[in-house]
Amino acid sequence: MEDKDKIEIVPKTQEKATSTVLDEAPKAAEAEKKAPKKASKTSLVLSILGGVFAAFGATLFVLPFVLPKEARPELSFPIIPSKTTESKIYSNLTGEELASETEQVAPAYCVQIPNGMDGARPQAGLDEAGVIFEAIAEAGITRFAAIFQDPGTAVIGPIRSLRLYYLQWDTPFDCTIVHAGGADDALAAVKNGGYRDLTENYTYMYRGTAGARRWNNLFTTAAYLSQMNSDRGYGGSNIRGFKRMTPEEALVIRVDETATSKLEITEAADGNTSALAAKVAEASIKFGGLTNFNVKYSYNASTDSYDRKYESGAAHDIYDCPDENLGEKNPENVCTLKVLSPKVVVAISVEEKKSWDNYHEDITTIGSGEAFVFQGGYMLHGTWRKDTVADQIKFYDDSGVEIALAPGQTIVEAVPSYGSVAY
């Protein structure tokens, strides 16, 4: 059991996300939906941001996560469209270059990994996940749905239970759902929906020494997952990922260091300036209630990534376990510590409420809401949209253009209305 200190949280009023009846199973992907209509309003963001920066002389700029529509500045940040390079293959999961088409369709695994204070930390192998969704699982405690493709790590975990909303985010990745039991509605959806499924199983998972981890000691390995995939005849995965820039496109994005409150994003190929965005060095994500789960991301220009730390200031350390052939080991005995540092951080506003038991959470995944995309040291404001369980979530700027994410590990933070994003 995780820390069950219940807290009473009264959500603020927010615009209700459009929802549909939950799909019972993943089906063949529907035809791509049209992007939202372009909002042709004049952007005021540069003058607003410039004034604030001039007044305060700081790089940290804070806005409420959910602003009244009439008080929210209209931003318009289209970004460089992703291109196809015939001679190169880019991962549908991460956007990074692959050596072959075989790697493109390698098996994917969606692993439920806890983040509680009851022995879940540090997590193992989380640095190898191409995409991570973080959301509240219960009582303000967050949990990760981490998507791995053909991992090569000695240890992955710990592994905990499944929630329906994590399953719905997982679905477009065509992955094996790796978990230890779960909520009744989630387990029913997995059973009846034709999902590839691996729940607690001591052929392909193992229990490490409990110790300080207590019940958070269920792990798997890359070798076990590969063996399971072969034994069950699951085959490869057809991942429907996010829209991505190619690595080449990401490299030609440059910072205009003469600007005080914006970046100029330029594509060298044709010289066209394609976006103006807020220059942001740090982002703070608050899920509400329990401060142990609020996080900050600091942009590291030398690695072009975001170092993750908790609100206390402590780094989010994880175990890096590069040798996949070590067998059933405790991660603290075979792995080294490193800081979790994703390339892209996306914060999305979600409709969230207590489940029937007034303890666990229900999150609406189908619909739309506000979004903030942090990458390359800047921020793009816009919206997210997911039309069905089978559809991938997409991100649009305020003019309706789909945002192409930089290649590399991406974390999507699902923030309730009583939470906030500051930058």
Image (cartoon, rainbow, N blue to C red):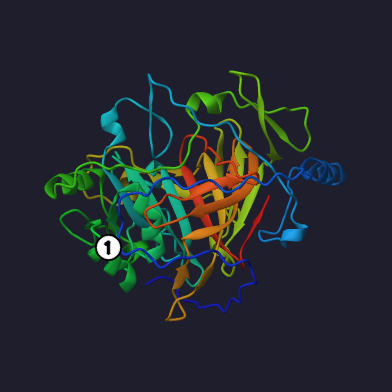
Q: Quick one: quadrant of the N terminus?
A: bottom left
> Relative to 249, does residue 226 appear above or below in the rendering?
below
Can you give x and y, in whole percent of width and height, for residue 63 in the image? 72, 55
Q: Is residue 207 above or below residue 277?
A: below
Query: Looking at this view, is 314 or 56 the one in front?
Result: 56
Report the number of discs: 1
Identify the residue shown where x is 65% and y is 71%.
13
The kind of residue on which mark 1 rests is Val
Label 1 Cα crowd, 10 Å radius (few <14 / some 14-19 / many 20+): many
Q: Relative to residue 353, is residue 57 drawn left or right?
A: right
Give left or right: position of 180 versus 251: left
Left or right position of 21 against 61:
left
Q: Residue at x 19, y 43 (%)?
A: 235
Q: Where's residue 25, x and y in %?
A: 30, 60
Q: Secondary structure at mark 1?
A: helix
Q: Which residue is mark 1?
A: 190
Residue 84 lies, in percent from the top left, at 44, 26
